[in-house]
């Protein structure tokens, strides 16, 4: 089997947002005399601290926000999940930052005008640079919206596959900081891929008991390519496991297997630490939270090796799997939990899905209509979110794939229309 194709396949094992090439950069210390410095340096919140502030190559400034919550856990990550971008490493202070740290990026022009600020939330294995500034060498949403007069901010999470509730807490802290420095009462959230799950959890009030209650400070929630009714890609397609073993020091391979054992050169090897199973190391806590069964809607690909045992659990010809039901349970039946908790009724919701499974060089999701990663029926499932009265202002499907949803011209135009004005 060719090794090049599985390497690309893994990009979509974990509901990928997009993958871009991070470039080394340099920045100097913050000039306290520049741009609303009194407000910028105040950090009044008791929930977080601004533990570092600096200039960035693509951003007017970058702040490291550190949660003060004593209960904030230290999540574990595989070594190939560390930060690679020199700028982000300096901003975090390490290539392996703790989960309590998040970077808040200020786009140029953030302090101009009075428009509702916009916060961009990325998905897995990417960051604010590769997702929102220049994804795949294209103009990103951050400079595009800034040029249109929007006040734009973005996040970079420390753990690429972190618990979605921890991501939600970091989003809440970032919103509080944006409100502090801009004086705005509300923020618009634009989230992509895995980031949609965390953003939805925040606005639905789904949280750990120690976390900050939702402050009713989101005007509009915009979800791009979101697994709103979950996904089962990793269990549906056993083939991806071949692209993840053996583990290599490559950020593109920082994605979870689902085979807990694997037959390699006649030997059964324990691969459980490389999986998303939380009882086998828990290196990918956010992944099991997004799982949901779709086998009743779309037939499983019976041509893929060990398709039945991979999905349902058991020992096949070349693998052993705990099955999707166990993984869903270990993730706390998270999608069901979200379904039972609709959005706050004061929020306006907009959803965009793609219908082109044409991601180049990868294993696209073609067992049902999809954007190459997420089924359209999942991405457009909004009834659970609006059940308490949240207003659905837009729900559309464009001829785009999962990655194009954040940078294609028609997606940008759609977003600009959706953001509008209060």
Image (cartoon, rainbow, N blue to C red):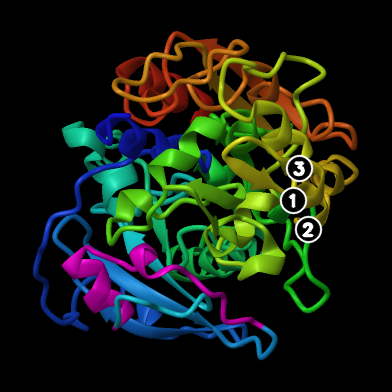
Discs 1/3, front: 3
Residue 403 location in percent, x, y?
38, 29
The numbered mark, 2 or 3, whose residue comes first in the sequence reads: 3
Q: Is residue 87 magenta?
A: yes
Q: Is residue 83 visible?
A: yes
Q: Is residue 123 magenta?
A: no
Q: Residue at x 32, y 83 (%)?
A: 52
Quadrant where the image shows the N terminus: top left
Q: Secondary structure at mark 3?
A: strand
Q: Secondary structure at mark 2?
A: helix
Front residue (pair 375, 393): 375
**Where does label 1 land, which residue?**
327
Residue 81 location in percent, x, y?
38, 63
Discs 2/3, front: 3
> Distance of mark 1 from mark 2, alpha carbons?
5 Å
Residues in magenta?
72-93
Q: Is residue 17 visible?
A: no
Q: Residue at x 83, y 50 (%)?
A: 333
Say few, some or many: other residues with alpha carbon within 10 Å of mark 3 (under 14 / 14 to 19 / 20 or more). some
> Distance of mark 1 from mark 3, alpha carbons?
13 Å
Q: Residue at x 38, y 19 (%)?
A: 413
Q: Please give left or right for residue 146 compared with residue 296 in the image.
A: left
Cβ–Cβ under 8 Å for marks 1 and 3 = no
> Distance of mark 2 from mark 3, alpha carbons?
17 Å
Q: Which mark is residue 314?
A: 3
Q: Secondary structure at mark 1?
A: helix
Write down the quadrant of residue 315 in the picture.
Answer: top right
């Amino acid at each position: 089997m060719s090794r090049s194709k599985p390497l690309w396949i893994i990009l979509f094992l974990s509901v990928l947002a997009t993958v871009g090439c991070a470039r080394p950069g340099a920045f100097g210390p913050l000039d306290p005399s520049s741009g609303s410095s009194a407000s910028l340096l105040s950090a009044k919140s008791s929930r977080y601290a601004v533990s570092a502030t600096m200039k960035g190559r693509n951003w007017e400034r970058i702040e490291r926000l550190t949660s003060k919550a004593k209960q904030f856990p230290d999540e574990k990550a595989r070594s190939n999940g560390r930060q690679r971008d020199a700028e982000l490493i300096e901003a975090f202070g390490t290539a392996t930052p703790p989960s309590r740290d998040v970077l808040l990026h200020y786009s140029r022009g953030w302090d101009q005008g009075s428009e509702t600020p916009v916060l961009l939330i990325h998905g897995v294995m990417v960051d604010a640079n590769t997702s929102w500034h220049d994804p795949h060498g294209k103009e990103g949403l951050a400079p595009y919206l800034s040029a249109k007069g929007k006040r734009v901010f973005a996040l970079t999470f420390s753990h690429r596959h972190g618990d979605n509730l921890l991501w939600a807490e970091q989003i809440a802290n970032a919103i509080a900081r944006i409100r502090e420095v801009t004086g705005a009462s509300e923020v618009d959230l634009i989230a992509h891929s895995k980031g949609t799950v965390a953003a939805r959890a925040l606005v639905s009030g789904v949280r750990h008991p120690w976390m900050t209650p939702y402050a009713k400070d989101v005007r509009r929630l915009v979800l791009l390519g979101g697994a709103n009714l979950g996904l089962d890609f990793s269990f549906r397609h056993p083939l991806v496991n071949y692209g993840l073993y053996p583990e290599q020091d490559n950020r593109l391979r920082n994605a979870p297997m689902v085979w807990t054992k694997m037959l390699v050169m006649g030997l059964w090897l324990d691969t459980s630490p490389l999986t998303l199973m939380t009882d086998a190391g828990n290196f990918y806590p956010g992944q099991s939270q997004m799982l949901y069964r779709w086998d009743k809607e779309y037939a499983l690909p019976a041509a893929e090796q060990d398709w039945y045992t991979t999905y349902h659990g058991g020992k096949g010809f070349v693998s052993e799997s705990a099955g999707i039901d166990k993984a869903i349970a270990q993730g706390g039946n998270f999608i069901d939990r979200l379904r039972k908790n609709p959005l706050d009724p004061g929020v306006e919701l907009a959803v965009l899905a793609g219908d082109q499974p044409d991601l180049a060089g990868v294993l696209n999701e073609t067992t049902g209509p999809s954007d190459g990663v997420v089924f359209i029926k999942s991405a457009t499932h909004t009834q659970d979110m609006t059940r308490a009265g949240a207003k659905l202002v837009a729900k559309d499907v464009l001829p785009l794939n999962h990655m194009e949803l954040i940078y294609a011209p028609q997606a940008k135009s759609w977003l600009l229309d959706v953001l509008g004005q209060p």
